[in-house]
Image (spheres, coloured by chain):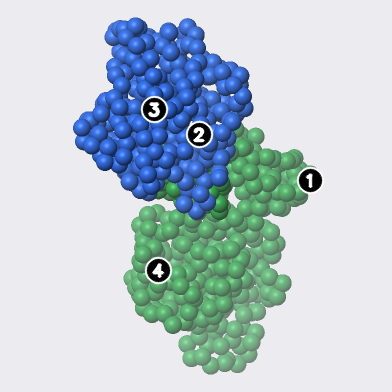
C-alpha cells in the first residue's frame, strides 16, 4: 500500500542544488515524487520554495526518506486538521462546505489522514462520531452532521494511471472517428479481461440505441458469459429490449428486417402493459412470457440493474424508479467495486453515472457521436476514453472477441 | 585580479585560552583523555595573534569565562554582517552557553544582535563563509555547510538576517565537520577547496562559485590546510603542504605556518581561532 507525505523546502534551493539532490534522494530510495508547488525566486533576494509529495511503497521507507530529507532541510508540510461545521438543517450544508471531486480524498482529523469512504464528485464530506469520513450528497445530510468546510486539511490523490495505460495512449488524444476500431476493440477487451481477472466489476450503461442497432443479442451474450456485473439504463432501453425479444421490433421497426410493421408504433406500449400486468420484469421472466433479450439475461443470471425514469417515459415499466434522487442513491450503492464502466450509446444515463463514479474507474464511452465523450469530460469525468462507432456492430465484435 | 583583494580579513575577534581544554568529545578529533598543555596552548595562541597583527590585522579579544572551553574557537560565535551580529545556536549542549557570552560582547561593542529563531541550528562563521556574488544580482554569496553542526533549514533565517544569498552545501565527512575545514576564500577569484568534505552536489556548487579553486588532496584536507586565515596576501596556516605553498606563492600570496597543535586536539586550527569582524554581507 503506497503511503504519501508532503514536504516543504525553502531557500536558495536551486543554486545550492538542494532541490535536485532531494529529488534524487527520493528516487534513489525507491520512492516517487510529485512537485505540487515550486516558486522560484525572481530576484536574488527572493528565496525559492518547493512543495513535494513523496510516495513511498510503505511506511518504513517513507520514514527513512523523511529522515534523509530532514537533513537536507525538507520538512513535512505542517497541515492543520480539517475544520467542520454542523449542518444547519436536514439536506443543507453549512456555508463554505468543501465540495468533493471524483478523486480519492483524505481528510486530516486529529493529526491523521483519514480516507473518505468513497470518491464521488459534487458531494460534501461528513465526519462521523467514529471519525470516519463519509462522502455525502446534499440530500443525505442530517441536521448537526459535522461537515468539512474550507480546503485546509483536505487532500486528493491524483488518479493512478491504469497499469496497462501504455496500450491506451492512442485513446488519450482527442476523441475522433478516425481511430483504428479493431485496435480499440482489442484494447478494450484486454482491459475487460484484466479487470475480471483481478476480481473487479464491470458496469454497463446502455441507451435504447443499443437495441435499435441490433446490439441487444450480443449484449445479452456478454451478460450471460459474466462480462457484466451491473447495468444502468432507462425505461426506454428496457422497454425496447423486451419489445424486440417478444415482438421482434424496436419502436415498431423490425430488428431483423429494418421494415416498419403494421401497428408497430404501439408495440412498446403493449409490452409495457404486459410487464405491468406481471408486476415486474423478473415476474415476466418467471411466468415464461419473457424468454430472451438483455433484461431476461440480467434476471436469469442475477445481475443487478437500475432503471432510472424520466419525465418523457411511457408507462413506465414497474421496475423503473421514478424518483430521481432514489435512482441516484441506488446507482451509488451499485458502483462500489466497479473497476470498469462501459457507456453504450447513452448520453443522459452516461453523464448521470459519471457523476457517481470515482475517477479511478476506467471508463469507455462507445457512441457514434463524439460529443458524448466531450460532455462527460466537461462534467468532470476526465477519465473517459471515447470510441466513436456504431454501437450495435461494435458490441457483436466485442462479444466475439471475448468469446461470449 | 591581484592576490590580497579580499574585502574582509583585516579585523578579527580572538579569545585567549585561559580555560581551554578537551573536556567533552563532539568531533572525531576530540579525546578527553588527551591532555592539553595549557602553557603551550597559550604560547601558540600568542604567536598566532602576533602573526595576524604582523600581517596588518587588528585583533580584538574576548575574555574566556570558566565552563566554556571551546569559546577559544571564536569562528563559531556567529555571523557578522556590517554592524549586525547573528549569534550561533549550537548543536551540542556543552557549547550552548557560549551564545550569550558572545552576544553580550557584540552588544557592548556596538553591534546590533539579530537572533535566529529558537529552532534554527547553525554554528556561525565556522559553517558560513562569504565568497563572490550571485550572478544575477551581485549580492554576496554565503556558502554554508550543514549536517554535523548546522542545519540546512537555518539558511533561510540567516539569509534574512544578513542579506546574503545563502547556498547550503552538505558536509559528508565527519572529520571535516565544519565548512571552514573544507573551504578557505583567498581572494575574489580563488579559494582553497577540499572536495573530500562534500558530495557531488556540493562540489558542483563550489565549481560554479569559484573561478580558480585550489583543490586540496584528502591528506591536505585532513591536516586542516583549509582552516587558514587570510590577511591581505598573508595566509596564516596550521601547516603549509609543499604543493599548496608553491601554488599560493605563484599566485602572489605569502603562506606562513603557525603551530596550533594544542588546538588540533580539540579539532580546530587557525581559522577556528578567529572571527572576522569586517564582513559585510549587505549588497553593494
Alpha carbon distance from label 1 to label 2: 66 Å
Q: Is residue A275 visible?
A: no
State whether discs 4 and 1 lie on one chain: yes
**In the figure, what tint was chain B given?**
blue
* Chain letter of disc 4 in the image: A
Q: Which residue is mark 2?
A: B279
Estimate the x, y position of residue B220 in percent, counting from the top left.
24, 31
Residue at 53%, 78% in the rendered image = A370
- Badge 3: residue crowd in 10 Å (few <14, some 14–19, many ≥20): some
Residue drawn at x 43%, y 8% as measured from the top left = B18
Q: Alpha-carbon neighbours of circle 1 within 10 Å: few (<14), some, or many (≥20)?
A: few
**Of marks 4 and 3, the one in the foreground:** 3
Closest to the observer, A20 or A43: A43
Neighbours of disc 2 within 10 Å: few (<14), some (14-19), many (20+)? many
Query: Could you tell me which chain the residue with mark 3 belongs to?
Result: B
Residue A129: where, in percent of width, then height?
65, 34
Residue A67: % across, % down: 41, 33
Circle 2/circle 3 CB separation < 8 Å:
no
Closer to viewer: mark 2 or mark 4:
2
The picture quadrant where one finds residue A349 is bottom right
- Does label 2 or label 3 sit earlier along the sequence? 3
Q: Are marks 2 and 3 in one subunit?
A: yes
Which corner quadrant of the image does residue B219 belong to?
Answer: top left
Q: Which residue is mark 1?
A: A89
Which residue in the structure is indicated by mark 4? A169
Residue displayed at 34% across by 11% down: B43
Query: Which numbered disc flags the more N-terminal residue, 4 or 1?
Result: 1
For residue B55, the mark is: 3
In the foreground, A82 or A228? A82
Q: Chain of mark 1?
A: A
Amino acid at each position: 500500500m503506497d503511503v504519501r507525505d508532503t514536504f516543504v523546502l525553502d531557500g536558495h534551493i536551486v543554486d545550492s542544488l538542494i532541490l535536485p539532490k532531494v529529488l534524487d534522494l527520493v528516487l534513489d530510495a525507491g520512492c516517487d515524487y510529485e512537485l505540487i508547488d515550486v516558486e522560484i525566486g525572481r530576484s536574488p533576494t527572493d528565496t525559492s520554495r518547493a512543495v513535494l509529495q513523496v510516495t513511498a511503497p510503505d511506511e518504513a521507507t517513507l520514514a527513512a526518506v523523511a529522515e534523509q530529507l530532514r537533513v537536507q532541510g525538507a520538512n513535512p508540510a505542517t497541515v492543520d486538521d480539517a475544520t467542520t461545521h454542523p449542518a444547519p438543517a436536514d439536506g443543507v450544508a453549512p456555508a463554505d462546505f468543501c465540495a468533493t471531486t471524483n478523486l480519492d480524498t483524505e481528510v486530516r482529523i486529529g493529526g491523521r489522514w483519514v480516507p473518505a469512504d468513497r470518491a464521488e464528485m459534487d458531494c460534501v464530506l461528513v465526519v462521523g462520531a467514529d471519525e470516519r469520513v463519509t462522502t455525502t450528497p446534499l440530500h443525505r445530510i442530517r441536521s448537526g452532521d459535522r461537515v468539512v468546510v474550507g480546503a485546509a486539511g483536505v487532500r486528493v490523490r491524483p488518479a493512478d494511471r491504469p497499469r496497462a495505460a501504455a496500450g491506451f495512449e492512442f485513446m488519450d488524444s482527442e476523441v475522433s472517428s478516425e481511430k483504428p476500431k479493431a485496435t480499440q476493440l482489442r484494447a478494450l477487451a484486454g482491459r475487460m479481461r484484466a479487470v475480471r481477472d483481478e476480481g473487479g466489476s464491470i458496469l454497463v450503461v446502455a441507451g435504447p440505441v443499443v437495441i435499435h442497432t441490433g446490439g441487444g443479442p450480443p449484449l445479452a451474450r456478454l451478460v450471460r458469459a459474466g462480462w457484466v456485473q451491473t447495468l444502468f439504463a432507462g425505461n426506454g432501453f428496457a422497454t425496447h429490449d423486451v419489445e424486440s425479444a417478444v415482438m421482434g421490433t424496436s419502436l415498431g421497426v423490425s430488428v431483423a428486417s429494418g421494415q416498419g410493421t403494421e401497428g408497430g408504433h404501439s408495440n412498446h406500449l403493449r409490452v409495457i402493459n404486459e410487464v405491468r400486468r406481471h408486476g415486474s420484469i423478473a415476474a415476466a421472466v418467471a411466468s415464461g412470457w419473457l424468454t430472451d433479450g438483455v433484461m431476461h439475461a440480467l434476471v436469469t443470471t442475477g445481475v443487478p440493474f437500475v432503471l432510472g425514469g424520466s419525465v418523457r417515459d411511457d408507462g413506465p415499466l414497474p421496475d423503473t424508479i421514478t424518483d430521481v434522487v432514489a435512482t441516484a442513491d441506488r446507482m451509488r450503492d451499485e458502483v462500489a467495486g466497479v473497476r470498469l464502466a462501459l457507456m453504450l450509446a447513452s448520453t443522459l444515463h452516461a453523464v448521470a453515472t459519471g457523476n457517481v463514479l470515482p475517477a479511478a474507474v476506467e471508463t469507455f464511452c462507445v457512441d457514434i457521436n463524439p460529443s458524448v465523450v466531450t460532455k462527460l469530460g466537461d462534467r468532470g469525468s476526465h477519465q473517459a476514453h471515447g470510441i466513436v462507432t456504431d454501437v450495435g456492430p461494435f458490441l457483436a465484435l466485442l462479444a466475439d472477441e471475448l468469446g461470449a | 585580479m591581484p592576490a590580497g583583494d579580499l574585502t574582509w580579513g583585516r579585523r578579527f575577534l580572538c579569545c585567549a585560552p585561559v580555560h581551554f581544554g578537551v573536556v567533552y568529545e563532539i568531533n572525531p578529533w576530540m579525546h578527553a583523555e588527551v591532555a592539553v598543555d595549557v602553557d603551550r596552548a597559550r604560547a601558540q595562541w600568542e604567536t598566532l595573534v602576533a602573526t595576524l597583527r604582523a600581517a596588518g590585522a587588528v585583533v580584538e579579544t574576548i575574555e574566556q569565562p570558566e565552563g566554556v572551553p571551546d569559546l577559544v574557537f571564536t569562528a563559531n560565535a556567529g555571523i557578522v554582517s556590517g554592524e549586525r551580529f547573528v549569534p550561533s545556536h549550537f548543536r551540542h549542549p556543552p557549547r550552548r552557553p557560549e551564545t550569550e557570552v558572545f552576544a553580550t560582547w557584540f552588544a557592548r561593542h556596538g553591534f546590533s544582535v539579530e537572533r535566529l529563531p529558537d529552532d534554527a541550528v547553525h554554528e556561525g562563521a565556522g559553517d558560513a563563509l562569504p565568497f563572490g556574488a550571485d550572478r544575477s544580482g551581485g549580492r554576496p554569496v554565503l556558502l554554508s555547510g550543514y549536517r554535523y553542526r548546522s542545519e540546512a533549514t537555518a539558511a533561510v533565517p540567516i539569509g534574512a538576517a544578513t542579506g546574503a544569498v545563502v547556498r547550503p552545501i552538505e558536509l559528508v565527512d565527519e572529520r571535516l565537520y565544519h565548512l571552514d575545514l573544507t573551504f578557505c576564500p583567498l581572494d575574489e577569484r580563488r579559494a582553497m577547496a577540499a572536495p573530500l568534505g562534500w558530495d557531488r552536489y556540493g562540489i558542483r556548487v563550489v565549481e560554479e562559485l569559484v573561478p580558480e579553486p585550489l583543490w586540496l588532496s584528502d591528506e591536505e584536507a585532513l591536516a586542516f590546510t583549509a582552516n587558514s586565515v587570510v590577511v591581505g596576501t598573508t595566509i596564516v596556516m596550521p601547516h603549509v603542504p609543499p604543493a599548496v605553498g608553491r601554488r599560493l606563492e605563484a599566485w602572489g600570496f605569502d603562506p606562513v605556518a603557525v603551530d596550533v597543535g594544542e588546538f588540533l586536539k580539540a579539532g580546530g586550527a587557525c581559522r577556528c581561532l578567529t572571527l572576522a569582524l569586517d564582513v559585510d554581507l549587505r549588497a553593494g
